[in-house]
Image (spheres, helix red, strand yellow):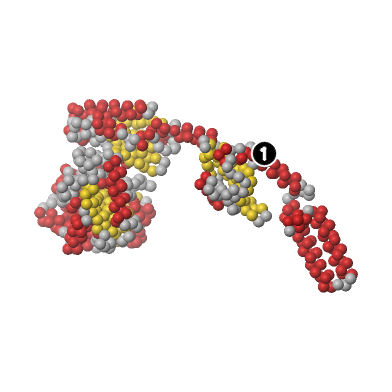
Amino acid sequence: MRKLKSFIRNKKEIVTFNSVLLLLTISIAFLNKSALFFVCLAFCVLCFGYTVYDYIARFKFFPAGTEDTFSKFTVNALMDLPQPVLMIGSDDSTTWYNNAFSAIKEVAGIKSSQSVKGVFGGALCYSAIKSKVDGFTIKLGEKYYDIHSTGFISTGRSYVLTFWSDSTARHAAEKTLKMKNVVVGYAAVDNAADVASYLQEQYRSMIAKAYTELYSWVSGMNGIIREYDRDKYVIFVDEENFTPNISKKFDILDRIDTAVSGNSNRLTLSMGFVVMDGTLAEKEEGAHEALEYAFQRGGAQIIVKGRDGNVSFGGQNRASAKTTKIKSRVTADKLKTLIHESSNVIIMGHKNIDVDAIASACAVARLTVTLNKKVNIVINPDDSALESALPFFEGLSEYDNVFVDHVQGQELLSPKSLVVIVDASNPKIFESIDIYNNASTVAIIDHHVQTTEFDTTPTLQYIDPTASSASELMCEILEQAIPRSALNSSEAELLLAGILLDTQRFTRNTGVRTFGATMYLRTDNKMMLKARSLFKPSINEYLKLSSFRKNTIVFRDVVGISHFEEDNLPENRVIASMAAEDMLEINQVKASFALCTIGDDVHISGRSDGSYNVAKVLEYLNGGGRFEAAATVMKATTVKSAMEKLREAIDVCWNDKFTIGGNI
């Protein structure tokens, strides 16, 4: 068979064969052998047809007589090409390679017809190469090679021809350029006003000590630091000198903390850095955003905005409460302007809404109604918190058609609508992410630590983690925007309930601002009793709390952990937060975490007595919140698995010097 194929491929033999066959057919025709004649005629037609097809398919692009010459020239040229070339078949076998490829010592073990499935992690497999249409890069020893390919079919079999280019010099240049990339940063004293008011004489001395440590740190990286405003600095340093600080977890924070120790009102710094490619103007803007992000997370920390996202360091210190009302007044003025310029206002809080979110949403609604604008509040009618809150609005005609679901809210959205989001700053937990994404103008008012950056900066952004609750923030805004008489008693009672919820009846996270907001509401004993009535547990909740208590353990001597998995009802979320608060009453427990099942997910509520940053722990589990209160949801998992990951997160924070106890 092989000889026959070779015979047919030879043009001279083909001509001779076809001529003999034609003469034989004619001779048979003269002999009047009709049956044999038709057989020979058919065979003759078949051979002539194949000859024509073979000529067109094989020689139409080449002048006669040049095919063999061209094929030999191509093979010889590829063989002597200084660029390595490797041909691989569709069965992942090495079909052919040139001299330059065989000269690469790292691939000397690759032989002809050898499978490449186990070579370089399968990077040279036929399917892997075909899928990388733009080429790819591999490292062999100290060298890098860029690999590009082209595919073809021969004798019914598929092949890929790979061309290797030595890119070692380019990679070295890129690495050098990256290491010399300028990192831009901002540093600022984040509690200057608070420290200066208590320690006027020592303040400048503390600033000098902090700056000495900061200057020494930057100088040690061969960087530049300059003070551009009072207690504010700009920093420039090469990336190769800056990067080691990440593995050291920026011990500069500890050095500064040690330098200014000895006072209960300790001076703290926040910093924001940008490790990215781009212009200096882009880096400067990014560094400023990183510093603002550090402030919003409570200060006393460093935010590094990298190529793959943000990384935070520090955060051991609880944010200092701000007593100034300047920002509240500015926010109130801007919010009133946005309401005036809008066609209507749509308000929403977070999913699984609570009393604080409902109350602060109603406060924005009251401001909107006072300014004679149409307002709606987007809710999930199935949220359990609404059962106890909605009775507050009975008899109030202004709220007859205010509450809508997310579908109706989307229909009410127009290009001039203002969307106000309260008690949440993470888009993932907004009541309706679609309304947020489609809105042209957005205002966000929240008291939680911001855990993610916004893709589009909101028109108004008032995020203050030092406030006890969103209700407290809205009380401050209303105080600057409308007279107290415009607020009816039901709204005031609901706002008080929101403050009670997030301060645990004034036992956690309270300050001058909290009691100032309560004074604004003109609280009396009757109002307090009605607000507290929202938090009485039902008999079912009471029994579930007993189960939480029965399943409580103490981890690392000071962290209480409990769980409930007897059912997976939505109400478990609220009971878990109550259980977490309950564990703080245990002697020596400084922080607590309560886990419960909701559907197929596990919800975790975290609480702290103020000496441990539970938000930092739950950020490792894609959650967040405030220093003393945080939460997260772990999708499609079990309580056992969630418990293991929670302990890992606690250990990570523990090792990151998030120690418990004292003024950390």
| Closer-to-camera residue (86/492) | 86
Residue at left offset 16%, top offset 43%: 512
Q: Quadrant of residue 255?
A: top left
Q: Is residue 543 above or below residue 483?
A: below
Is 206 in front, or is 234? 206
Front residue (pair 383, 178) = 178
Residue 521 coordinates in the image, percent (x, y): 16, 50
Across and down, in percent, residue 226 comes to 34, 28
Residue 257's spot in the image, x, y percent? Answer: 25, 33
Horizontal relation, residue 603 to residue 62: left or right: left
Task: Give the residue at x 35% y 50%.
Answer: 441
Q: Is residue 385 above or below residue 214?
A: below
Q: Residue furthest left?
A: 525
Figure quadrant of the C terminus: top left
Check disc 1 and report the residue beneath it: 80
Q: Is residue 294 visible?
A: yes
Callout 1 amino acid: Asp
Circle 1 packing at 10 Å, graded few (<14), some (14-19), many (20+), is few
